[in-house]
């Protein structure tokens, strides 16, 4: 009987932890990504971040007294591998004293001026680009990497094939899935082809395409290790009896510079 009680308690405890994890972080937290040095001088430099409230509480003038002592600041892991390492403590201290005005899930660009102590002056200031289609300052140690890591044929009929997919950012840099324009034409694209084998070639027949949407909670930013899922209806009008393989690409419009450009596709058989 004692063993049964312990087992029930353990299951309840683990379930409660799992439920908490599903809800996300219930507190004050800000994630900083897409760092870019916009000016550099001997005594200081200006750095631009994409800052996102990834906690569950409002960051504002009214809550500053509370969040100042309880705020968790997380900087993109990729940034830590650059020469920012020598300035990281300076930047964190600067960010701790900032006055944020961010609702849960809200994201915005922000610039910060960082003063460099005398003993650190004269050293190289970091430059990071983590996506968005701009290749300036690309660093292989900091790059995002979109992987088509799940592709499933849900159903099919003579006219259409229906698929579900999951895309994961396996790189060390964050990436902007959603562009700045009101239309979707600068979003990341998913495109499907019919081919004779899983190996893509020039003979593959374009079938359909779509632009990714979602990620409202992070304003379109897909952070390292995170995934986005989607569904797609693909016309079989152009499919022939020799092209029974459906190949699906992510970032088909190639607007993002990635660590690995060869893992962006997967395939499924459609007879």
Image (cartoon, rainbow, N blue to C red):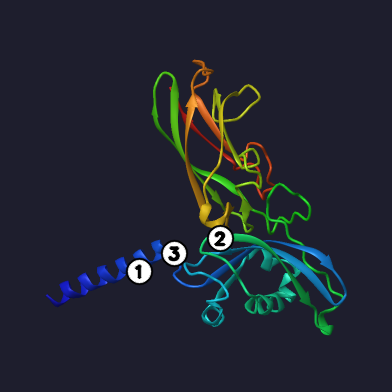
* Residue 270 position in % (x across, y down): 45, 25
Mark 1 or mark 3, which is nearer to you? 3
Q: Secondary structure at mark 1?
A: helix
- Outermost top residue: 241
* Residue 95 position in % (x across, y down): 65, 75
Q: Secondary structure at mark 3?
A: loop
Is 245 situated left or right of 258 in this image?
left
The quadrant the C terminus occupies is top left
The quadrant the N terminus occupies is bottom left
Is there any visible trace of residue 134 in the rendered image?
yes
- The disc, 1 or 3, on the residue closer to the chain's N-terminal end is 1
Calculate the distance from the C-alpha at mark 1 to the C-alpha at mark 2.
26 Å
Q: Which mark is residue 24?
A: 3
Work out whether 95 lies above or below 188.
below
Q: Quadrant of residue 113?
A: bottom right
* Callouts 1 and 2 close, C-beta under 8 Å: no
At label 3, counting other C-alpha atoms closer than 10 Å, the crowd grade (few under 14, some 14-19, many 20 or more) is few
* Residue 250 position in % (x across, y down): 58, 40
Residue at 59% across / 41% down in the picture?
264
Q: Secondary structure at mark 2?
A: loop
Residue at 64% across / 38% down in the picture?
185
- The disc, 1 or 2, on the residue closer to the chain's N-terminal end is 1
Is 198 situated left or right of 157 in this image?
right
Calculate the distance from the C-alpha at mark 1 to the C-alpha at mark 3.
11 Å
At label 1, counting other C-alpha atoms closer than 10 Å, the crowd grade (few under 14, some 14-19, many 20 or more) is few
Q: Which mark is residue 106?
A: 2
Q: Quadrant of residue 265?
A: top right
Residue named by callout 1: 17
């Amino acid at each position: 009987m004692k063993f049964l009680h312990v087992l029930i308690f353990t299951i309840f405890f683990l379930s409660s932890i799992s439920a908490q994890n599903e809800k996300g972080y219930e507190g004050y937290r800000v994630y900083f990504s897409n760092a870019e040095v916009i000016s550099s001088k001997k005594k200081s430099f200006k750095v631009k971040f994409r800052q996102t409230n990834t906690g569950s509480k409002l960051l504002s003038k009214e809550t500053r007294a509370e969040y100042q002592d309880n705020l968790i600041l997380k900087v993109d892991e990729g940034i830590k591998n650059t020469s920012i390492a020598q300035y990281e403590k300076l930047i964190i201290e600067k960010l701790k004293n900032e006055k944020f005005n961010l609702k849960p899930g809200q994201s915005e660009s922000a610039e910060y001026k960082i003063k460099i102590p005398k003993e650190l002056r004269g050293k190289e200031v970091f430059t990071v680009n983590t996506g968005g289609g701009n290749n300036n300052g690309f660093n292989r140690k900091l790059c995002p990497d979109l992987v088509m890591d799940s592709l499933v044929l849900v159903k099919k009929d003579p006219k259409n094939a229906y698929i579900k997919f999951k895309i994961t950012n396996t790189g060390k840099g964050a990436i902007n899935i959603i562009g700045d324009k009101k239309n979707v034409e600068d979003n990341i694209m998913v495109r499907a082809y019919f081919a004779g084998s899983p190996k893509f070639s020039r003979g593959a027949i374009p079938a359909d395409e779509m632009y990714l949407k979602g990620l409202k909670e992070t304003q379109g930013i897909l952070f390292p290790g995170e995934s986005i899922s989607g569904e797609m209806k693909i016309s079989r009008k152009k499919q022939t009896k020799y092209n029974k393989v459906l190949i699906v690409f992510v970032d088909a419009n190639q607007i993002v510079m990635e660590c690995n450009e060869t893992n962006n596709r997967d395939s499924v058989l459609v007879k």
